[in-house]
Amino acid sequence: MIPEDNRFESDPAEALPEDPGLPAGWQADSVDGDAPAEVERLTELLRAHERAARGWASGSEEDVLVEVHGLETRENVVVRDDTGTIRAWGSVHDRAEGRMLYVHIVDRTLADDVATRCSDVLFAWAEAQARQVGAERGLEVQQIDTGAFADDERQHAWLERAGFTCVRTWWQMSRSVEPEEVELVAYPEAWSRDGVEFRLVRREAGGLPDEADLRAVHEVLEGAFTDHFNSAEETFQEFIHRLREDPGHRWDHWWLALVDGEPAGALVGTVSESSQGPDGSYVSYLGVLDTARGRGVAKGLLHTIIADAAARGRDRVGLEVDADSPTGADGLYTAMGWGTKYVTESWHREVPVS
């Protein structure tokens, strides 16, 4: 359930030792998400981090606002230097029971020793937050789940120093979309093939999505990923709340696939906005129940979002795939024209709560 107040410790001073080990005059502080200058600075740090670790930047102010405005499920800390400039940023997300997501960004212009001291403070703060949220949830162990670009050696060294282990590799894939692919399916809103019905999540008279359809999407995805890496049960309320926070969220990008009239597959898409050309579409979630595999459900859902993207004038569809997917999904994506654009990793640490 979504709590009325977040489960974290909001005061950095309470989550860190009296002397956190920063240079003289530097301090760990909270973030003012309503201050444009602070959001701009965090965006600058995020984009510099991406450029150094991956080669190009894609982060936006909208991405930052998700972290600093998600007050029910998120908490943030920054490290300010002796002039008040933000030099490091940490964000935690109470994602699901037993799983806490963590963002860790340190100014790329800092000297190595100072950068490492900032990094140590962020990790100490994240560990304290893991114990806090784990205690609030009544857990014995709380997982911290953070990501890194595959070629980011500085981040890898810090993660190992903080007791994290690299547990998974992810291929970030993209596929170009041609205008004529609008004809891949008859109508992206609703079509059928070989006994499988594909349709958008229905809308009520007021324009809001039909709750029964949303619950069907949630149930399909929960069932489809039960045996996948790091699967964590997420309530319907947590699921909807989290996906609505995505800057690219659109209700008209949610599809269901029905076999014999029953929900058997689901695809949740989003918009990848671009300031320098056409927008793209993104497959946030694609799941098919075991009982429906082999019926062309996944391929049909992918054809649907490609055709929808073509109809909207978009030039690409992106997605993420587990490099060790038990379903061999990467083979389907490659056969349908997706290629790997870059690689990321998941790093975990299990924190005892008591």
Image: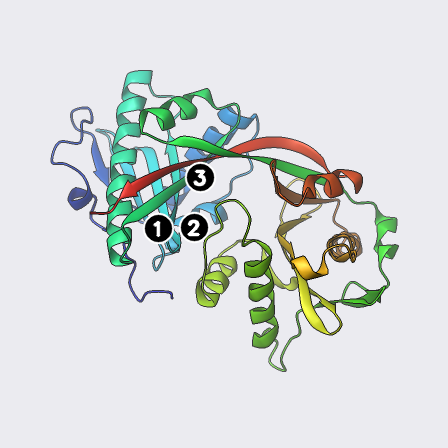
The residue labelled by disc 3 is 43
Residue type, numbered disc 2: Leu
Does residue 81 lie above or below 304 as drawn? Answer: above
Instruction: Using the rendered image of the protein, determine whether residue 54 is visible from the camera's viewpoint.
Output: yes
Most foreground residue, 330 or 19:
330
> Which structural element holds mark 2?
helix
Please, what is the three-letter code of the amino acid marked with disc 3? Thr
The local secondary structure at tag 1 comes to loop
Q: CA distance from mark 2 to mark 3?
A: 9 Å
Q: Position of residue 8 (x, y in %)?
A: 27, 52
Q: Which residue is mark 2?
A: 65
Q: Residue at x 49, y 24 (%)?
A: 52
**Disc 1 or 2, which lies upstream in sequence?**
1
Label 1, on which residue? 33
Residue at 45 percent of width and 64 percent of height: 235
Label 1: few (<14), some or many (≥20) within 10 Å?
some
Q: Earlier in the sequence, mark 2 or mark 3?
A: 3
Residue 158, quarter of the rendered image? top left
| Discs 1, 2 touching: Cβ within 8 Å | yes
Q: Which mark is residue 307?
A: none
Q: Looking at this view, is 51 or 161 the one in front?
A: 161
Q: Residue furthest left?
A: 18
Q: Position of residue 324 (x, y in %)?
A: 60, 37
1 and 3 marks in contact (CB < 8 Å) = no
Identify the secondary structure beneath mark 3. helix
Q: Is residue 123 above or below residue 295?
A: above
